[in-house]
Structures are given as C-alpha cells and as structure tokens.
Image (cartoon, grey):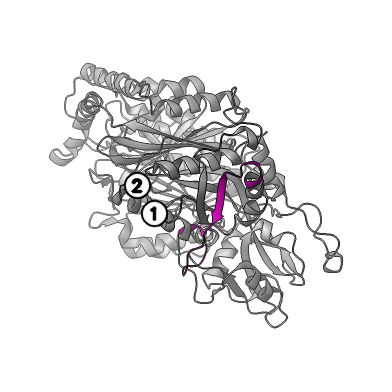
Amino acid sequence: MQTIKLKLRQTSQKGFLVSLTCSEQQVEIEGFLPLFPKVLQAAFRQWQAAYRQLEEVRLSLSPQPGFRLTPKAVTVASNTEYANAVTTRLNQWLNSAHREWQPIREGLISLANQLESGEIQFIVDTKEIHLRRLPWQEWDLLEKYYPSAEVALSTPKDRDSTITQNLPFPNGSKPRILLVVGRSNGINTQSDLEVIQQLEERGAEVICLMQPSLKDLCETLWDEQGYHIFVFTGHSGSGEDGEIGWLEINNRESLSIEEFRNALKEAINRGLQLAIFNSCDGLGLANQLAQLNLPQSIVMREPIPDEVAVDFLQYFFNEFLRNQSLFTCVQKARKRLEHFHSRYPGSVWLPTLCLQPSVQPLTWQSFGGNFAKLKIIKSTRSKIQKNSNISQTIGTILIASFVSFALGFTAHFALPAAAPASPYAAKISAVEARPRGTWQYGGSTTWGPIRAIADREIKRKHPDFKLIYTPHPTLPAGSGTGIAMLLEGELSFSQSSRPVRDSEYEKAARRGVMLKQVPVALDGIAVAVRSDLKIKGLTIQQLKNIYTNRVKNWQQLGGEDLEIVPYSRSLQSGTTGFFQENVLGRKSFGENVVFVDDTAAALDKVKSPDMPGGIYFASATEIVGKCGIKPLAISYRFGSAFVAPYTGELVSPENCTWQQNVLNFEALQNGEYPLTRRLFVIIDQNRQADEKAGETYKNFLLTDEGQKLIKKAEFIPIRSF
C-alpha cells in the first residue's frame, strides 16, 4: 500500500504551508495554499445549517420511538443546491492557478502517472476544524487521477506522528468485539445491533453491555484478553470546535473520554485496533481517543439519518469481511450511499476515516477472522421505518497525528528523478557554485560519512565553495544543535537526521525566519547488542518497553538472565529525537537509560564483558559493519516478519575481522525495514547569501553523482539516477 499525504499548517492570515509526501517515491514537495475563500465558507455554512436543522430537533422535540431524531421540515431542493455549491466552490479553490499552489497540484498529477498499480492511502493532515469538515473526496483532481483512493484524516495530536504498528493484537484465534449500547431514547439501535451480532456467524466473539454504569464499562475494558473492536451506539456529541466529545452511556451518566481514559488506554495497550461510534458528530471523540494512541477510525463529521447510518455499517462490514483494507471498505461503503443524495444531500460525504501515520493495513484476517467462506451480512433496512431520519454519527476507527502551527513559508519543489523532465544535473561539476566564499555548516553526527565522502568531492571540484564544519563550543553535536545554531545566525545551513519540529518552526517565525528542509538521503536506525547475546530480534513494542524501563531483563524477552542496560546519545541528537518520536511514542526515556557522548563510546560499553546486557541504537551505517556487536532484526509488531538491517546471514564473530555484514539497501529503501528516516539539508530563507549557499549545497547532493556518493557513504539515495 502506498501513502500520499497532504500536511497543512496555517502560517499566517494569508494561508497554509502545504507539504506533499509519497511513501513510494520518497518525494517531498512544498507549496502554499491561500485561505479558503469566503464564497466557499458561505456555501459550506449554508449547506451545514440546512442539514443540521434535522439535528437541532433533538434539543427541542421528543423523538418518536424507534427513530434517532425527528426532523423539522427542510426544503430539500435548497439543501441540494447548497451541497452542489460546496462542491463547486471547493474545486474552484483547490484548482486555483495560484503560483505557489501549483507545485502541489502538479506533483499530485506527476505521482499519479508514476505510481505502480496498487492501493493508495490518501491522507489529509491538518489541525484546522474547518478543513477537516470539508468533503476532500469531492476534489475532481482526486476523482480523475486517484479514483480508487479514499481520503482519510490524520487526527490532531500534541506533537508530530509516531509509529503505531507496535501495538500487539489480543491473544486468541478469533476477533473480539466489545459492543456498548448507551442511552438510546428515541434512537433505533436494534438495526445496528443486528449488524454487529451477525459478525458472530463469522467467528467473532461479541461482548455486549446494555446501558452500563461507568464501573461496569471500565472493568470490562480492563479484561485481560483484550478486544480488537470497540463499538458504541447511543447518544453522543462533540463541541463546535471539534475538540471534545462525550458519550451518554446510560440515562444518568454522560462521559467524556477523559473520565475512563485509563481503562481505554489499557484496552489499547492490549491491542484494541478499531472503535466504532454509531453516534452524533464524532470528530471530538476521535480527537480525544487519538491522544490515547488508538490506531484508526471512521467517524461521521455531521449527524446522519438512521437508514444511512445502518446501511453504511452494513456495507462497511460486508467489505471488511472480504478482507479488504479499511481504505477500500470505507470508500466502497460511502459510495454506495449515493442513492440517499436526493433525500439527504451531502450525507455521502460524512463517513470519515481517521488514522495515525505509518499504520499497517488492517484487515479482518489480521484479527484472526475467517473469510474463506464469504457470507454477506443481511440487510436490516426492512426493520427501519420509512420515515426514520437524522441520527448520529457512525465512527469506526480512531487515530491521529497532530499538525500544529508552523509560521514561515517554504516553496520547495523537488519532483523525483522518475519525473519526465529531471531538474537535477548529472555531475557535481555541472552545478554552478554560487555564491563563492567560505560557508560554515554543522549539525547531525549521522552525516559524518557523507561529509567524509561527498563533501570532500564537492570541495575538490569547487575549491571556491569552501565548506567548514562548525560544532557548537559547548552543546553536544547533533541535529537539534545545528538547527539552533542556524536560527542564531551561527551557520549558513545545517544538516539534520530528523525533520524540523513544530517548536523550531514557531521559534523561527518569532524571529522572522523562514526555514526550509530538503530531503537528500535515507537512513536506517539499527539496534546493537553483544554478538553472543541469545536474542535475534525485537519488535518496536519490545524496544519501547526496554527504553521506558518496563522490561529490565533479557530473560523477559526469551534471552539469558541478564540485566538490560540501554544506552542512548543525548536528546540533542537527531537519532535520539527520531527514536523518541517513532519508537517511544513521545514518551520520556526511562530512568534506566544511560546517556553517552557518542556512538564509539556506546559500542565499547555494549561490547564490554563487564556489562553483557547492553543495547544501543544508532544509524545503520555506524552499526552494521562493526565487530563484537550484533545488529538485531526488527519487526513492526508481534506476528509481523522480522527484517534485518543487513543482507544474508549474520557474520560470525570469528570471521568478522575479514568479512563484514553488508547494509540491506533494498529493505531500507522500500520501507520493509521498520526504522527508516530521511536526512535533510536545513536552509534559512531570510539571509540571501546563506540561502543561496544552502541551495547550492543541496543541489550538489541531488545530482546523480551526489546521490552515488551518498550510496558510497552507505546511505540510501533519495532519488534514482
């Protein structure tokens, strides 16, 4: 599965900084989208107001038995016109000829022509509630070039994304589903229950709670067996800002997620993958559950009619039982709702998939479900009265990633080499070295091999373009230190083994600085232990448990009875920052972690017979070929394949002096190895001479020759040549 992501950050009152990335092509394109026009805002508000007339009745009239809500009279014709106006205005905005938006549109078209056949995840990553409510799937560019791709939302979090593949699945051979029926006065929940209960015919175990107390709900969520799916049906809601949601679990208790967060976190830690909320306006619920690291979700962005809600649930599970991915299931189920458009204009927009980045595709089979003998869920429509109307939202798998404010605009446009017209030169000597002079640069220690090989060649071919690596006089070397020095004007450009953080963008904006990050290479993170330690590999979750002090002895992981001593470089290190973001899920390192000055010192400690239980992580180039240590194979999660950062069989210690392990370039490049990252050149766009120096250095590395030198330094070229 290939992932295309649009990340939008509001940079000012003028619009949004937009980043387009593609997992398959390793592309990074940046552009700028003006604020959505007032005519689009007006059209959306008119449609929303007409549509929400059905919801407002919930507060003023008693719903009839067997129905979710009793609607007021609505002029359907005008609502249809409003829905059509939203689609028209949305396309006018996203198809605008704005010069700084064109790189994004052109990049999407170029990628569509390059990507091989296969499923595509298309993700819109934004914090802005107004953008999250828009029907992105109505953009005609997506319909034309990505007809099989469903648009998902990346749910906001406090910081950037984290790897979530490390969640274990619950023990057992069949899917476990927890179904909670809350206060349902006036709501027809019977059809929802029948859809879920029919999953028992497919081998699922369904545990049902009818209007439970808070205590009963919490105790059930703490069940040691865990659950794959959590389903709630009943009354609920979200605030207008889309931040907070609540559930009415019985006739007395209305709860926010915060009131039973520990129980939910426990269920998630035991493998909960999917939460379905058959209730009103689920964006607030999705936001709160995202903070608990729940991997995926589908919610309705607005209230939804009973019959539409039940049909969507039925269509979705029919596809899911065919072992289709969530993206395919949501898209097909959503499109099958089109026959409701004349009665409920815009309702086909509402089913919304929310998920965290880097999540492995979820299928029914991955739960242990049986799909060999297909049996379609029977329709429950006959049980719904014809005049049933507006309900509340179905949401189905929740997960998130935060896109915070980052002031400053970047207009970097770097198409991959496979584009029809490559903007890259073949030789370093073909790039004009302007301006001439002496340029101080610094930052990441991971870049050391590139500096030793590629930078030396740059200096040889362009002696008038002098490069001086400049460390900080007191702070430890690393990506964070380099970016800090760049913001202080102490460097012309910097090298980083991690992306610029939102906090660094904000600091730059306060100083009137606009930072630009350009990826030039890929790297892997390898994990080292003593060569004689009887451990072959670790999952991401096991790594997290080690470095957060939850697992303290190798015996707990199937090894010897040895104390685990985890080592790490300082927090200024880009490698450490990447590890904390993507393995620890932004949690703090445990008190058991020993911080060291550099990789050489750490590997000496790991190899030492005095502390045989040591473990350390670093760039794969610093670990794979070393003697006396063993690079471990890594797995995304329990049950997934272990992938080594080296090729072939592990070289034995006695042969290591004349035969060394070789980096697994293929697994690192195609994403099969779980711990990969990009290396960036960071450029200050506000200082003219320094900006040109940074651009020139970046252009050197992106030539065919520069990419070959990067590979010679044992890093992965970011583009073909």
Residue 49 visible somewhere in the drawing: yes
Q: What is the magenta range?
A: 459-480
Q: Is residue 9 shown in magenta?
A: no
**Image quarter hosting the C terminus:** top right
Total marks placed? 2
Q: Secondary structure at mark 1?
A: helix
Quarter of image, res 170:
bottom right
Q: Residues within 10 Å of mark 1 (few under 14, many from 20)?
A: many
Q: CA distance from mark 2 to mark 1?
A: 8 Å
- Front position in the image: 565 or 524: 524
Residue shown at 64% from the left, 73% from the top: 601
Above or below residue 166? Residue 262 is below
Q: Which residue is mark 1?
A: 487
Side (left or right) of 377 relative to 605: left
Residue shown at 39% from the left, 54% from the top: 487
Where in the figure is residue 227, as x and y percent of width and height? 50, 55
Labels 2 and 1: the sequence-earlier one:
1
Above or below residue 577? Residue 65 is above
User: Which residue type carries mark 2?
Assistant: Val
Residue shown at 53% from the left, 39% from the top: 696
- Answer yes or no: do the residues labelled 2 and 1 have beta carbons within 8 Å? yes
Above or below residue 226? Residue 68 is above
Where in the figure is residue 233, as x and y percent of width and height? 35, 46
Side (left or right) of 318 relative to 92: right
Residue 513 tag number: 2
